[in-house]
Image (tube, rainbow, N blue to C red):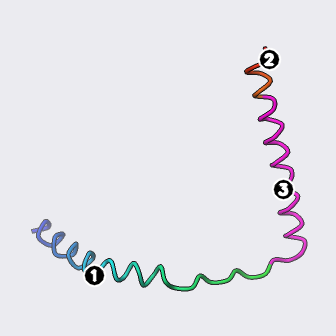
Amino acid sequence: MGGAVSRGTRFLRMYNIDNRVNKVLSKEKPTPAPRYPTDQQNLQSVNAESKNKFLFSQSFLIKYLFFR
C-alpha cells in the first residue's frame, strides 16, 4: 500500500517540473539590505588578513616542499 502511495505522490511532485524550475530561476533575486559602514570595514579587514595568511601559508608550503 505504501509503495502505491509513494508512486502517486512522486508523479504529483515531478509533474511539470521543467516549467516550475524555469519559473523559479527567472525570478529577480532580492537585493540585500545595505551594510553598516563598520561592518564593511570589518569585512574588508578580515578578507585582507585571511588573504595574507593564505599567501604566507602557501609560500611556506612551497619552501618546505621544494627547498629542503
Q: What secondary structure is found at the residue carrying circle 2?
A: loop
Q: Position of residue 9 (x, y in %)?
A: 21, 75
Q: Which residue is denoted by mark 1 in the rendering? A: 16
Q: Is residue 6 left or right of residue 32?
A: left
Residue type of the residue flagged with mark 3: Val
Q: Quadrant of residue 6?
A: bottom left
> Which residue is at 84% across, 37% downward?
56
33 shown above or below 57: below
> Which residue is at 88% across, 58% downward?
45
Along the polypeptide, which appears first: circle 3 or circle 2?
Answer: 3
Please say if the residues under marks 3 and 2 sit with CB atoms less than 8 Å apart.
no
> How far apart in space, not on screen, are marks 1 and 2 (Cα)?
60 Å
> Which residue is at 34% across, 83% downward?
19
> How far apart in space, not on screen, are marks 3 and 2 (Cα)?
31 Å
Q: Which residue is denoted by mark 3 in the rendering? A: 46
**How many other residues sit within 10 Å of disc 1, few (<14), some (14-19) or many (≥20)?**
few
Q: What secondary structure is found at the residue carrying circle 1?
A: loop
> How far apart in space, not on screen, are marks 3 and 1 (Cα)?
45 Å
Numbered disc total? 3
Q: What secondary structure is found at the residue carrying circle 3?
A: helix
**How many other residues sit within 10 Å of disc 3, few (<14), some (14-19) or many (≥20)?**
few
Residue type of the residue flagged with mark 2: Phe
Q: Which residues are magenta?
A: 35-60
Q: Quadrant of residue 64?
A: top right
3, 13: nearer the viewer: 13
Tell me the tag on residue 67: 2
Q: Quadrant of residue 67?
A: top right
| Closer to viewer: mark 1 or mark 2 | 2
Q: Position of residue 37 (x, y in %)?
A: 89, 75
Along the polypeptide, which appears first: circle 1 or circle 2?
Answer: 1
